[in-house]
Image (tube, grey):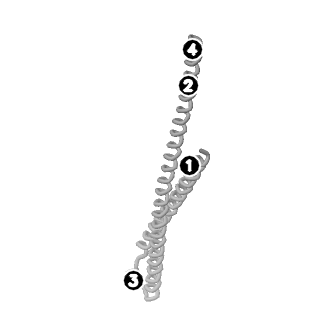
């Protein structure tokens, strides 16, 4: 019985750990989405001046290029975080299945133990009844 309790405890700790990991990935994903929104907003605010010299146009063009590169990099980070989150959720789902299996095994074991205890008690009561019957037969005879 002890090994079953240990198994359930280990499975529960695994589920708890994976839940924390999923929460961490969700927080990171949220932050990455926020950064991406900010980068996109900043990119929209970079405007090409209506009248300016070539140096100014070059500078604005370079600024827009850097902003586009930053957006692409952040989108890649976001995609990687989404993949990690998906893997963590899959692992959590599998760990929950394993925990449920361990709990089922534990409940089944407890049920069998109770049935065995009940049989032992019934045998004991049957033995007492047999002894009383035998004693009553001897007293009557």
The residue indicated by pointer 4 is: 136
Residue 63, position in %: x, y?
47, 80
Kindly indicate the quadrant of the structure image that contains residue 52: bottom left
Which of the numbered marks, if any, corresponds to residue 8? 1
Q: Marks 1 and 2: in contact by CB < 8 Å?
A: no
Give left or right: position of 22 versus 52. Answer: right
Cα–Cα gap, marks 1 and 4: 51 Å
The secondary structure type at the circle numbered 3 is loop
Kindly indicate the quadrant of the structure image that contains residue 125: top right
Cα–Cα gap, marks 2 and 1: 35 Å
Quarter of the image for the N terminus: give it. Answer: top right
Which of the numbered marks, if any, corresponds to residue 37? none
Which of the numbered marks, if any, corresponds to residue 51? 3
Could you say which is closer to the camera, residue 68 or residue 141? 141
In the image, is residue 112 above or below residue 51? above
Mark closer to the chain start, 1 or 4? 1
Mark closer to the chain start, 2 or 1? 1
Cα–Cα gap, marks 2 and 4: 16 Å
Say which of marks 2 and 4 sits in front.
4
Taking the view exactly as shown, the residue that stands out farthest to the top is 140
Cα–Cα gap, marks 3 and 1: 72 Å
């Amino acid at each position: 019985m002890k090994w079953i309790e240990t198994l359930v405890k280990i499975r529960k700790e695994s589920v708890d750990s994976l839940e924390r990991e999923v929460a961490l990935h969700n927080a990171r994903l949220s932050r990455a989405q926020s950064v991406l929104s900010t980068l996109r907003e900043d990119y929209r605010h970079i405007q090409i001046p209506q009248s300016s010299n070539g140096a100014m146009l070059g500078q604005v063009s370079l600024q827009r290029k850097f902003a586009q590169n930053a957006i692409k990099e952040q989108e890649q980070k976001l995609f990687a975080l989404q993949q990690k989150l998906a893997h963590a959720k899959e692992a959590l789902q599998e760990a929950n299945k394993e925990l449920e299996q361990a709990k089922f095994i534990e409940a089944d074991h407890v049920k069998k133990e109770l049935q065995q205890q009940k049989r032992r008690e019934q045998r004991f009561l049957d033995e007492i009844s047999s002894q009383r019957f035998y004693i009553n037969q001897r007293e009557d005879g």
